[in-house]
Amino acid sequence: MEIKGFKFSTVEAAIKKPGRKDLALIFSEIPANAAAVFTINKVKAAPVLLSAERITSGKAQALLVNSGNANACTGENGMTVAKETSRLVADGLGISDQLLQVSSTGVIGVQMPLDRFTSAIPPLIAGLQNGTFAEVAQAIMTTDTFPKMETKSVQTADANYTIAGIAKGAGMIMPNMATMLSFIITDAAVAPEFLQKAFRNSVNSSFNAITVDGDMSTNDTCLIMANGMAGNKVITDGTTEADVFENTLCELLLSLAKQIVKDGEGATKFVEIRVTGAVDDNDAKKAAMSIANSSLVKTAFFGQDANWGRIFAAVGYSGATVNPLFLSLRFDDVCMAENGIFAGGDAETRGTSVLQQKEFTVTVDLGLGNGTATVYTSDLSHEYVNINADYRT
Amino acid sequence: MEIKGFKFSTVEAAIKKPGRKDLALIFSEIPANAAAVFTINKVKAAPVLLSAERITSGKAQALLVNSGNANACTGENGMTVAKETSRLVADGLGISDQLLQVSSTGVIGVQMPLDRFTSAIPPLIAGLQNGTFAEVAQAIMTTDTFPKMETKSVQTADANYTIAGIAKGAGMIMPNMATMLSFIITDAAVAPEFLQKAFRNSVNSSFNAITVDGDMSTNDTCLIMANGMAGNKVITDGTTEADVFENTLCELLLSLAKQIVKDGEGATKFVEIRVTGAVDDNDAKKAAMSIANSSLVKTAFFGQDANWGRIFAAVGYSGATVNPLFLSLRFDDVCMAENGIFAGGDAETRGTSVLQQKEFTVTVDLGLGNGTATVYTSDLSHEYVNINADYRT
């Protein structure tokens, strides 16, 4: 895979502790059209505030990202450090710091050790000659158990372009905008307005449709950079090429989003929740998210217990319009309940078999209208408690 | 303790399985003024629908309650069974079935075995001669590890009256109205309108201020019956006696609510969350509930990890008005963060000591206004996962 004009580097800066590469750099040889979405949490990390301000230009050329420290709840000093590290990198690269995006993930509330950046940045820049995107995916991991990456190539009339993306995030995953870190790069030439639009649409049907634990991070960031070096005719809205680009981007983001759920902290199950028959799509999403975030439903998944009643209870308090007598529910294609009551027969046995799989689908029909929504979630296991009870140690 | 005119009985009906008393009856010798609040979940159990309709009269004389089966998601047959059991009891007691409240708790989606009620009801009624309220508290338990009960006596100018309450509920606890089963009886004479008002106020500052897991049940019910047999002058609104009654009722309900949190499924910690300095009380409650329901915060409590940053993150996505730079946080009287950042010094060590206690208080000041709220919650432990992964087996 080659994404023309992009270079990568990773180093060990020992930001939290030594032993792994925790600082990464993505660099485009020329400024790229760029778009980003950030957490809507009112407590935002310093790098989020800084990057959000800079991205309004619609341009970015490089991204500096670290794991081990979120630089959140760090006050004025946190912002000073974010600016200073970005200045050092921009100077080293010979670009304006306005074209540098910065991103951090890790523990909240601990001041960022500037000195470790100062010494790590020169080798980081020197390393751009031979780094890979996969190494960046590795460096941004925190509690993730595997790096998340996806690549897709598209042949257009005049050129071949590639879109590649990486993501991290296994806890504090809750949809509402970008809900973890994800960085997408492409050498396609894409008009800025269309890039914005296609990106937002794709984020909505991917990262905003997953939930692991209902917590929303202070640092969530999803960034796309399109440097145009593939040489294709600029993709503009309303064309066939635009449809292809948006569909490809959407698939790529969905793949990354599903990887995040599969790597959900302590997850042993990957569950697709489909709600149909809602009054509208918005109601369907409310019901689906309520199911996906219910601790009682998620522990039942972990226990492989076909406790469909808890799912109806979660639908009932979701805020969606519901008539209990119209509800039906399936685990994969096994009908567990119809008209609000147990389907009978061998549903219990067959439903339990479905839940013993590693992946399955829960479909709830509200029987009211045409609204639909699909979200993806994991179960709630002992390991989730283990990971989060001693995350900082 | 005597609450004049109330009688109690419990029997083993083996509704889910044999081995314990699971059916209880509370009976007042004369019709009592009564008020009740029920779950606002749109998927309501049959007994909730039936009791809600009957309580509009403002009168009740008896309550039939079972554990082991929620009679929820049981359709028309569930309602038929609820009506039939209440008719059998009312006939046996020689009262109108309109004066009988019915309540159920246990597994959702399983049809109620009417035949077990039919054979258990005669001995249940016969047992009213020598049963106790404490035995009823025992019979309504599901995953509870101890029965919950509280009694308070009040001396008025003309008589002495008693208020006594029992409650159950360790999972599916989420505030929004009555959030579990709780039954309060008193021999005080209380005017119906004031009884309604005092009861609603008391529920709001007690049961609606606790959360264990953020799930809202299909069966939540909180009922009060005041039969007036203490012989006191009828308590009406706007009097000193009214203040005393409401304060006493409020304390009693808060005691029961705290007992529920302490018995939260798998709970190892009892945590009081206080939010101050919010724009208004409503915002303060949003922020407090967001903290209390965060899986990340609750697992940190379990791990005794002074991870205050997660608490700020939960405040940030709560929907309350927040300025990150004005936030401060204390564990008991240890200041962990001020002006949005770590307080420094030995805060980490001292904060960790606080979290090693079984009970502690988290106070977050938003630094914006005079809004305050207090909620009570537990931690999220391995045992919670254990209990809920195989609840039905």
Image: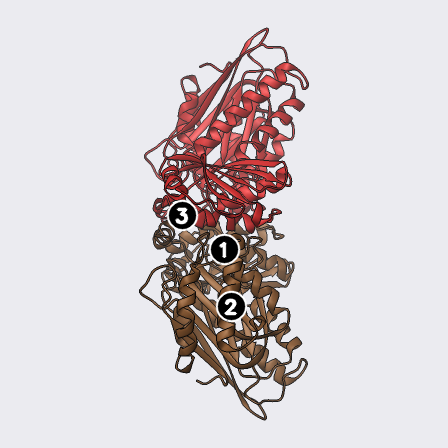
Chain colours: A red, B brown
Do the residues under discs 3 and 2 have CB atoms within 8 angstroms? no
- Residue B124 visible (yes or no): yes
Q: Tell me the kind of residue under disc 2.
A: Ser
Relative to B29, residue B208 above or below: above
Q: Nearer the viewer, residue B392 or A208?
A: B392
Please determine if labels 3 and 2 lie on a single subunit. Answer: no
Q: Mark 2 points at which residue?
A: B86
In the image, farthest residue toward the top: A158
Q: Mark 3 points at which residue?
A: A299
Which quarter of the rendered picture does the N terminus of chain B lie within? bottom left
- Answer left or right for B370 relative to A348: right
Image location (x, y in percent) of residue A263:
40, 35
Q: In this rendering, which labeled residue sits more in front, label 3 or label 1?
A: 1
Label 2 resides on the chain identified as B
Q: Which of A323 and B37 is in front in this view?
A: A323
- Residue A91 visible (yes or no): no
Residue at 63%, 59% in the rendered image: B282
Q: Quarter-wise, where is residue B99 in the image?
A: bottom right
Image location (x, y in percent) of residue A314:
51, 49
Q: Name the residue under label 1.
A: B72
Sequence order check, earlier mark of 1 and 2 = 1
Determine the CA span between mark 3 and mark 2: 35 Å
Q: In terms of secondary structure, where does tag 3 sit?
A: helix
